[in-house]
Image (cartoon, grey):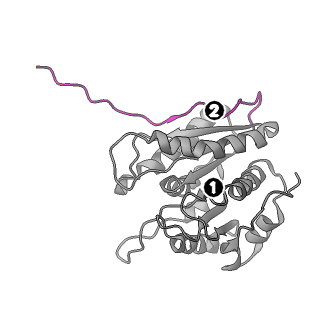
Amino acid sequence: MGQQATTVREARLGKAVGPVPATVSGVVLLLPAGAETSARGPSPLASATIRPLGRALAREGRRDGLAAHVVHYRSRGWNGAQAQLARDADWAADEAVRRYGDVPVCLVGVDMGARAALHAGGHSAVNSVLALAPWLPEEDVAAPPEPVKQLVGRRVLIVHGTNDERTDPELSFRLAARAKKSNRDTCRFEVHSDGHALHQHRTEVHALARDFVLGSLFGRAFSRPVQDALAAPPPLGLRMPLASGFGRSLRR
C-alpha cells in the first residue's frame, strides 16, 4: 500500500481588503490571533475578526495608495523556538515587496499576531508596527527576554485593555519600556475597563489605529495624543489613556 502524501501548508496573503489602488504606495499586513502551540491550520475566525480593522484602514487610506492584506499562516501555533507566526510575518513582508515594489509596510497584529508583528518588525520593508493586546510569554530569568532591538528605526504602537484577562497588560508595558530605551518612536495606549478583544471601545481603537498607521506610512500628521505619547518619557508615553470619543474630531 502506497504511503499517503502529507499536505504541506504554505503561508499566503489573502485577497486584498477592499479595492487595490491603481498605484500602491504603502501596505498593511494584518496578522490574526494564533495559539501558543498548535499544528492545526490557521483559524478562519481569527482572520475574520481582524478584517473589520483592515477594511477601516483600507477605506481611509485608499486615496494615499494603501493596500491591505490578511496574512494566512501555515499553522496557528507559535510553537516555541520555531516562532512560526513571526517567520510567516517576515515572509509576508517579502511577498508585499515582491508584489508592490519598494513601499513601506506596517505590520498590524492582534494577540499572538501582535507578538509576530513585533518580532518581524526588523524586516527592511517595515517602517511601523501596531500591536493590539499582544500575547507575550511570562518573564523567566532563565529565558532570554522578548527581543526589541529589531524595532529600532520603526514607529511602534502597543494598545492594551486594562481588564484583559487573556494577555497581561503589564507584560506589554514592560516590553514597551525596554523598547523605548533604544527606540524613542515607541508608545503605548491603555484602554481603561476594556478586555482582550477591545470591543467596548472598538470605535476609538480603530480611530487610533488609522491615525497611527496612515501617519506612519504616508506622513500624515499624527493626532495630538499620539504626538504626545511618542514624545513623552516613560512611563507617561507608555501608559497613555485612550480617551472616550477619540477620533470624532480628528481632522486630516
Residue found 27% across the figure and 30% down from its top: 6
Instruction: State the SS at label 2.
Output: loop
In the displayed structure, does residue 76 sit left or right of residue 19?
A: left
Residue found 50% across the figure and 45% down from its top: 46
Vertical placement of residue 99 versus 48, above or below:
above
Q: Position of residue 243 (x, y in %)?
A: 75, 68
Instruction: State the SS at label 1.
Output: strand
Asked if residue 28 shows in the view, the reply is: no
Of the image marks 2 and 1, the number of the one nearer the N terminus: 2
Q: Position of residue 154 (x, y in %)?
A: 66, 58
Hey, which residue is sitting farthest top in the picture? 1
Vertical placement of residue 158 versus 68, above or below:
below
Question: Disc 2 marks which amino acid?
Answer: Ala
Looking at the rendering, in which quadrant would you find the N terminus? top left
Q: Main secondary structure of the magenta part?
A: loop
Residue found 52% across the figure and 47% down from its top: 32
Question: Disc 1 marks which amino acid?
Answer: Val
Residue ID for mark 2: 16
Asked if residue 81 shows in the view, the reply is: yes
Q: Position of residue 52 (x, y in %)?
A: 64, 43
Residue ID for mark 1: 129
In the displayed structure, does residue 26 sit left or right of residue 51?
A: right
On whether residue 5 falls in the magenta region, the answer is: yes
Q: Which residues are magenta?
A: 1-25
